[in-house]
Amino acid sequence: MTHLTRRTLVLSAAALPLAACGGGINSDGGARIDARVDNAIQFMYSEVPGTQQLAQDAAGMLVMPLVTEAGFGFGGAYGRGALRIGGTTVDYYSATSGSFGFQIGAQQYAHTLFFMTQDALANFRASPGWSAGAGVRYAVTTEAGDIGVDTTTLIDPVIAVVYGQAGLIVGATLEGTRYTRILP
């Protein structure tokens, strides 16, 4: 008869989430992220007019096809996505954030960061962990249904578009979100 110790139970329980990540060598993690990114881009183009023009004008774009956020006093969010330059994936990233305050609920959303200058893109790629902050301009849908891309918007170094929101927390902000390069 096998004797189950507390240490064996704890180590087994800790190994299960790691095994479920599926990010090992020869995994299809990159292909899955790329497929989700492709779907998110098509959804964004169809639901948020003006984003195709942003994509054409951008030096690169980071697409996070699914970010899950939950909170009950303390909150957190996590998602994985891909950095695309010229329509090609060059790196994979995770997005994480934490919060504290009056909050309860959960939501999922997608977002894309458009790097409008080569300098903004280079700074993002050179950073070991880039955080979204005051330098990010949010493009919001106007009454006409367009995101209102104009010459003042296009000079902003980073433009964020949040779309596909579903859940019980109102609004989504990327303030304080940290982006880190990952292996898929």
Image (tube, rainbow, N blue to C red):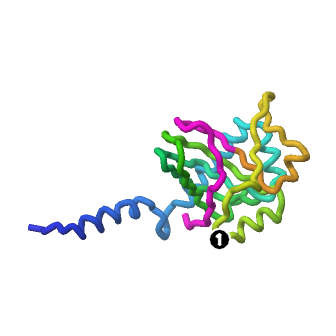
Q: Position of residue 174 (x, y in %)?
A: 65, 50
- Number of numbered labels in the structure image: 1
Q: Residue at x 79, y 28 (%)?
A: 143
User: Is 73 contained in the magenta span?
Assistant: no
Disc 1: which residue: 128
Viewer-closest of 21 and 172: 172
Q: Position of residue 106 (x, y in %)?
A: 50, 41
Position of residue 3 relative to residue 113, above or below, is: below
Decide if residue 13 is on the left or right side of residue 71: left
Q: Residue at x 65, y 46 (%)?
A: 173
Q: Residue at x 24, y 70 (%)?
A: 7
Amino acid carrying mark 1 in the image: Pro
Q: Residue at x 60, y 38 (%)?
A: 165
User: Is 172 contained in the magenta span?
Assistant: yes
Q: Position of residue 51 (x, y in %)?
A: 77, 43
**Residue 85: quarter of image:** bottom right
Q: Position of residue 79 (x, y in %)?
A: 56, 53
Q: Which residues are magenta?
A: 162-184
**Residue 134: quarter of image:** bottom right
Outermost residue on the top side: it is 143
**Quarter the C terminus occupies:** bottom right
Question: Callout 1: few (<14), some (14-19), or many (20+) C-alpha neighbours within 10 Å?
Answer: few
Outermost residue on the right side: it is 151
Helix, strand or loop for disc 1: loop
Decide if residue 3 is on the left or right side of residue 85: left
**Quarter the N terminus occupies:** bottom left
**Residue 62: quarter of image:** bottom right
